[in-house]
Amino acid sequence: MKKIEAIVKPFKLDDVKRALQEIGVKGLTVTEVKGFGRQKGHTEIYRGAEYEVDFVPTTQIEIVLEDELVDTAVETIVEAGRTGKIGDGKIFVMPVEEVIRIRTGEKGSDAI
Amino acid sequence: MAQINVGDTAFMLVAAALVLLMTPGLALFYAGMVRSKNALSTTMHSVFSMGLTSILWAVVGYTIAFGPAEGGLGKFIGGFGKLGLAGVVRGTSGVEGHLIPESVFAMYQGMFAIITVGLITGAIAERMKFKAYVLFAGLWALLVYSPLAHWVWGGGWLGNFEGSLGALDFAGGTVVHIASAAAALACALALGKRRDHGSPALQPHNLPMTLLGAGILWFGWFGFNAGSSLAADGVAGSAFMVTHLAAAAGMLGWLAIEWLQHGKPTTLGAASGAVAGLVAITPAAGFVDAMPGIFIGLAAGVLCYYGVKIKNRFGFDDALDVVGIHGVGGTTGAILTGVFASTAVNAAGRDGLLAGNAAQLVPQFVGVLATIAFSFTMSFIILKLIDAVVGLRVSDEEEDAGLDLSDHAETAYVS
């Protein structure tokens, strides 16, 4: 089993979610985060004082899937999330040790 | 009770309520500009004044300010005959033909005291112990505000009375704005800077709240300025008019400078400019005509834009710019009152420079300087005393956690 963490542009979240559902992903978790990569921040003005704000608000999606689905999921996220401009985001794939469903106690693939 | 004027009384009742509304408006204005962990603390500063200052005013503040100006000390504090608002329920105030119940007058004036204390709190934001604030607010209302109100409005040595200096201050350029700014400066110096001063973390957490507060202040200011005529008359009308125009001009003035300097006009700039204009027109409101009103607002919008930079130049943390807006704005207004005042607008006032009486500038300057000196000195002494007894500032940990939790065991925004 693998976990995918994908940082995507907030306005792309809906497209990515829909695309993932179409390939059979049953659930995901979304967090509002802030960060920066190559995307520049912005300047804000507060009563005559200018501030550089490096962080950009963005979105993190987490999904846990069977190994077989990972490549398709990654391609799906890339296609749905890409705008071609700096700041499109990144995807990280990492191994998962165990998954448990709280309601039933099921483990492993049955719990995904 | 002698024959009261029904129209004037109705108007003054409403005006008093409008002025009170300015204090929760101020609470919103200030709270939106601090970090969310201090939103309630900042709100509490203004709201608490509605409690404490009101009672102190009733018990002793009113009589110090508006007790009879007789006897040796009469030019400095009022007699104590109105302690506990004694006799107020039967008395009347004002001039013949325009009498209102003294209760209305006393409460109207009390609303001014409440908000003046609230104004100061812009400088103490995010680091003053609430206990220290309570002591400061109470002592300042009695020892600084009340005597000052007596000097300017209660028949004291500074105001426009027989045997006094003749400074014109229609609704409180000195008593309210310069006094609170001088006190704010004393507070900022006594407290020191916030720990994160200078960091980009120090951003307004809710500017929509600030803008709402500014709108409420603008609205309430009609009670503050027009109501200072103490009658529903022509002067109330002209005061209303120039108050509105000065707010508008102040906004445009600030936005123009901001747009030129930074390339973008900000909503905070719009709100700040409007407030600056309102501050500056406060001493002038019942004495000047429309175009001077616009000029005064415009001048304040521009000068206060630079005024807020003073704190950076001198290195003190006046968190919410009380000095830059109320100090610079109040002084601008006080001096320009000496320029534009005209008995053609208000026969009970005086003429200023442009009406042929350059001498009026002298009492205006004296009023500004005396207010700064008195308020700053007294505030500083009070602060040092409080520091010795309970300490002024919260601990580093408390400051980092936020005063909402540290002082009030509350969270403004529970997620």
Image (cartoon, coloured by chain):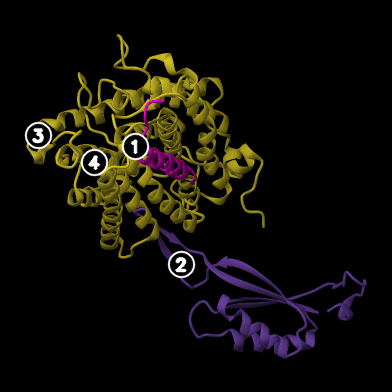
Locate the C terminus of chain B and report the quarter of the image it occupies: bottom right
Q: Which class describes the residues within 10 Å of circle 1: few (<14), some (14-19), or many (20+)?
A: many
Of residue B318 and residue B95, the one placed in the foreground of this image is B95
Q: Where does residue B261 sit, x and y in percent of width and height?
A: 27, 60
Locate the N terminus of chain B and report the quarter of the image it occupies: top left
According to the rendering, which colour does chain A have? purple
Q: Where does residue B53 sit, x and y in percent of width and height?
A: 49, 30
Farthest residue, direction top: B72
Label number found at residue B177: 1
At label 2, which amino acid type do we have? Gly
Residue ID for mark 4: B332
The question of residue B23 being in magenta is answered with yes
> What's the distance in space between the residues labelled 4 and 3, CA to CA?
16 Å
At label 4, which amino acid type do we have? Thr
Of residue B291 and residue A8, the one placed in the foreground of this image is B291
Which one is closest to the eye, mark 2 or mark 4? 4
Chain letter for the residue marked with disc 4 in the picture? B
Disc 1 is placed on an element classified as helix
> What's the distance in space between the residues labelled 2 and 3, CA to CA?
54 Å
Label number found at residue B235: none
Label number found at residue B358: 3
At label 1, which amino acid type do we have? His
Residue ID for mark 2: A41
- Label 4 or label 3, whichever comes before in sequence order: 4
Q: Which residue sits at x=57%, y=37%?
A: B396
